[in-house]
Each structure stands twice: as structure tokens, then as C-alpha cells.
């Protein structure tokens, strides 16, 4: 797993699988997880693509520069990864915060993006107070104090009851996230505003929503689909981390979109 330097010197942890000659597919995970969030998809997708996964700054094995971060900064990290790997154009699949970075890329680096998958995501928070409250709570009490609450938001109760190993894997990633990185990325999410830029996206786009997602409501995804000309919408019976809760349906939906 190489460490790639962003343009400000931040080391970004990257993992590459699949044939070097295959089309590139970059995956971007949610706030509070690392690149292993995609383990259920990686084996299948690596048969078709040069699969590139990375830990967002502030997460996993990547650096944790002082925040706050911005979506512009996080988007430029992706361009640095692609440039370092010699990838001129790529497909993109991002979930939650990864979908937000994907919207930035689609609007601001259109010559680099082939197709976009924007999953369980949002484009603008009018009310900043819930994010401010969460940031203050984590500053005071740490991520352990909200871990169980987050798992309840991220997965439906039937899934948590039937799949404790999968739930605990994501919970461990969450608890391993550095507080400073979580807060700096939360500030980027709080402050994003893609209301004017997302309608500029021209890349073929698939929007995935979780029908039972309380974190990024399905209607927010439907709004994004309407903002992007020709975008398609798929709804999965899942809460927020839909690729873990419905791994086969998610894998197949993305593969079908990217291959056709």
C-alpha cells in the first residue's frame, strides 16, 4: 500500500488492485471509516477495473493535518492520487462523504471523470447546528461516546441483529478514526454547498439511496438525481452504509452501471 503525497505534503494511504491496463475505478468511503469499508466489493470490481482505494486525510493510515478541511482540499487529494498513479481519467464510486467529494470532482474536474456513482449522500446542509453539536460532543467526549448511536443510524436494526460481525467491523473503523481527523472532515461536510455546482456535472451519474437511511435521507439523493441531467437512481433496502448492509445488490448495481 503506497503512501502518496498530496500537494500540501499530507501522506495519503492508497491500495491498488486489478490489471494496470483496466479502466480505473476510485472508491471513497464515508466519514469515520477507512478503505476496508469496500472489502465486500473489492474482489469483484477488481476483476473489471484498476481498483483504487484510499484513506481520506484524517482517516485510516493517512496523515492528519490540522483542520478544518474543505471539499476543495479533499477533491484535490484525489487528483494528486490519480496523477501519482498516472491515471488520466477514472470512474468514481463514493458513499456519504465520498459522494460529496465525487460531486466536487464531477463539477470541478470534469475532464478527469468518466462515470460517477454518488451513494447515500447530500449536497448542502442548511442547518449547521447538528454538525456543530456533534463536533463539540466529540471534542469533549471522544468518538467512543457516539459509536453505538452512529451504528444505529448507519444500519437497520434487523441488519445489526443478524450481522454483528459486519457491524462491529465498521464500528472498529469508527473507533480507530483519529478525533482531529473526524472533526476536520465534519467541518468540510458542514460547510459544503453544491447547490450551484452539482447541476454542472455532465458525467453519466448513478445516485444510490438507502430507503431506510436516516443520515442522508433518500429524498436528498432524489434531489441530486434531478440536479444532474440524465442521472439514474437506485434505491436499496438499507440504511446509511448501504454497500455493507446490501453488499450483493450494491456491487451489482454499480457494476451494471459502469459496464453498460
Image (cartoon, rainbow, N blue to C red):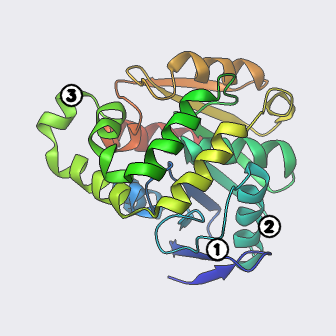
For label 2, the crowd category at 10 Å Cα-Cα, with few meaning under 14, some 14 to 19 and many 20 or more, is few
Q: Can residue 86 be seen in this view?
A: yes
Q: Give the foreground label among 3 and 2.
A: 3
Q: Which residue is drawn at 21% across and 28% down?
A: 157
Q: Can residue 116 be seen in this view?
A: no
Q: Distance between the residues labelled 3 and 1?
A: 42 Å
Circle 2 residue: 88
Q: In this view, does 250 lie to the left or right of 31?
A: left
**Earlier sequence position, callout 2 versus callout 1:** 1
Circle 1 residue: 21
Q: Give the foreground label among 2 and 1.
A: 2
Quadrant assignment for the C terminus: top right
Q: How far apart are marks 2 and 1 (CA)?
A: 12 Å
For label 3, the crowd category at 10 Å Cα-Cα, with few meaning under 14, some 14 to 19 and many 20 or more, is few
Outermost residue toward the bottom? 2
* Viewer-proximal residue among 10 and 127: 127
Q: Is residue 84 left or right of residue 185?
A: right
**Earlier sequence position, callout 3 versus callout 1:** 1
The image quadrant that residue 84 belongs to is bottom right
Element type at mark 2: loop
Q: Which residue is drawn at 50% across and 48% down?
A: 30
Q: Which residue is drawn at 58% across and 62% down?
A: 56
User: In the rendering, at what x and y percent does residue 256 appear?
Assistant: 52, 39
**Earlier sequence position, callout 3 versus callout 2:** 2
* Viewer-proximal residue among 139 and 50: 139
Q: How far apart are marks 3 and 2 (CA)?
A: 42 Å
Circle 3 residue: 157
Element type at mark 1: loop
Amino acid at each position: 500500500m503506497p503512501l502518496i503525497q498530496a500537494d500540501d505534503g499530507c501522506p495519503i494511504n492508497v491500495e491498488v488492485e486489478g490489471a494496470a491496463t483496466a479502466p480505473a475505478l476510485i472508491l471513497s468511503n464515508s466519514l469515520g471509516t477507512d478503505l476496508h469499508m469496500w472489502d465486500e466489493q473489492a474482489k469483484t470490481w477488481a476483476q473489471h477495473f484498476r481498483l483504487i482505494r484510499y484513506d481520506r486525510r484524517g482517516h485510516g493510515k493517512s496523515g492528519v493535518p490540522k483542520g478544518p478541511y474543505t471539499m476543495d482540499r479533499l477533491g484535490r487529494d484525489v487528483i494528486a492520487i490519480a496523477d501519482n498513479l498516472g491515471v488520466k481519467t477514472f470512474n468514481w464510486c463514493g458513499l456519504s462523504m465520498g459522494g460529496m467529494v465525487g460531486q466536487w470532482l464531477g463539477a470541478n474536474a470534469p475532464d478527469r471523470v468518466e462515470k460517477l456513482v454518488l451513494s447515500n449522500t447530500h449536497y448542502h446542509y442548511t442547518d449547521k447546528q447538528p454538525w456543530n453539536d456533534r463536533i463539540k460532543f466529540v471534542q469533549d467526549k471522544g468518538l467512543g461516546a457516539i459509536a453505538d448511536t452512529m451504528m444505529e443510524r448507519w444500519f437497520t436494526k434487523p441488519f445489526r441483529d443478524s450481522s454483528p460481525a459486519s457491524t462491529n467491523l465498521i464500528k472498529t473503523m469508527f473507533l480507530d478514526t483519529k478525533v482531529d481527523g473526524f472533526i476536520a472532515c465534519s467541518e468540510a461536510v458542514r460547510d459544503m454547498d453544491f447547490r450551484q455546482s452539482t447541476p454542472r456535472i455532465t458525467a453519466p451519474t448513478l445516485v444510490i439511496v438507502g430507503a431506510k437511511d436516516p443520515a442522508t435521507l433518500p429524498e436528498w439523493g432524489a434531489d441530486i438525481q434531478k440536479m444532474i441531467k440524465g442521472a439514474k437512481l437506485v434505491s436499496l433496502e438499507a440504511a446509511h452504509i448501504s454497500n455493507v448492509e446490501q453488499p450483493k445488490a450494491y456491487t451489482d448495481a454499480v457494476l451494471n452501471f459502469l459496464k453498460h
